Structure formats: structure tokens, C-alpha cells
Amino acid sequence: MINSIQTPSSNRNMKITIETTINSPISKVWDYWTLPEHIVNWNFASSDWHCPEAENNLEVGKGFRSLMAAKDGSMSFEFCGIYQEIIQFKSLQYILEDDRVVSVTFKEHGNETIVTETFDPENENPSEIQKAGWQAILDNFKKYVEMA
């Protein structure tokens, strides 16, 4: 028997977690997270990007799609996934097109809601960059909910 030390060959062995606390009740946070008319207003990481299209079929086995695009038209991509679990006002779990798993939890804390996302990183960018990008979108979500 040969003993060997295995080293991770990809980032997927280490999940990334981001979190924010939103000064808003959980029902509003849930609606703003899941309704396409709200998703288009927050689902981008910086002011030079936007989300001109969003669709969301909030059922297990069904999916969502958001078009994320640079405002100058230079670049765009679709962010799509299929829901694996939905517990209203509590959590969502979905699988992205590249088979990465994302879990989102919503915890009520008085009149605030704590939103936590945990996701499998992709293999193209360093984990720190991915975490910063996803956190920027989550921070944009917080700002949108609290301003509405």
C-alpha cells in the first residue's frame, strides 16, 4: 500500500462564505431577493455594470437567469441556476450551470435580516477576488433593500 498526501487540485474543496445584516424585515428581504422586478435593481457588483434582465421560477427543479452586463456594452454574461431546495423566508440552495453549489440563508434578528451566502468557488479566479465580487453584489442588495 502506498501512502500519499493529496493536495487540492482546485478551489472547489474550500467553500466561500459572505454575509450582511439588512435593516429590514425578512419578508421584504425575501421578496427583494426573489422577485425579478427587484433583482434587476441590485444584481451587479459595481456602478459600471447592471442587470437588464432577470427571470426567476422559484420552484425546486426550476431555475433562474440574470443577465449581467457592462453599461458600456463591452461585456455581458448570464448567471443561471436550478433550485435544489427552497424554504420560504429561510433558505435557498441552487446549482449553477457549471455544477457549483450555492446556499443562501435568511435569519430574522428583530427587525433585521442576516443574509449568508456560501458557494463553491470557480477555478479561474483567486478565491479572494470571487469573495470580494460576491460580497459587492450582496452589499448592493443591502443598499437597495434599505433604500426602498
Image (cartoon, rainbow, N blue to C red):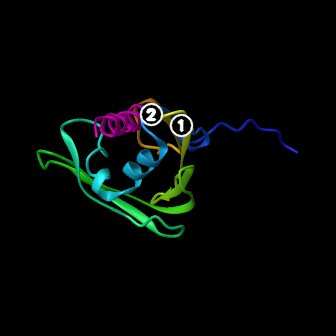
x and y percentages locating residue 75 in the rendered image: 20, 49
Give the dominant element type of the magenta stretch: helix, strand or loop: helix
Q: Which mark is residue 131?
A: 2
Position of the C terminus, as image quadrant, is top left
Q: Is residue 74 above or below residue 19?
A: below
Q: Which mark is residue 16?
A: 1
Q: What residue appears at the point 53 percent right and 35 percent down from the top-left corner?
A: 17
Determine the secondary structure under disc 2: helix
Q: Is residue 141 above or below residue 65?
A: above
Q: Is residue 55 above or below residue 126?
A: below
Position of the N terminus, as image quadrant, is top right
Q: Residue furthest front?
A: 111
Q: What residue appears at the point 22 percent right and 46 percent down from the top-left corner?
A: 50
Q: What residue appears at the point 37 percent right and 35 percent down from the top-left corner?
A: 142
- Residue in the foreground of this view, choosing between 131 and 8: 131
Q: What residue appears at the point 47 percent right and 44 percent down from the top-left corner?
A: 123
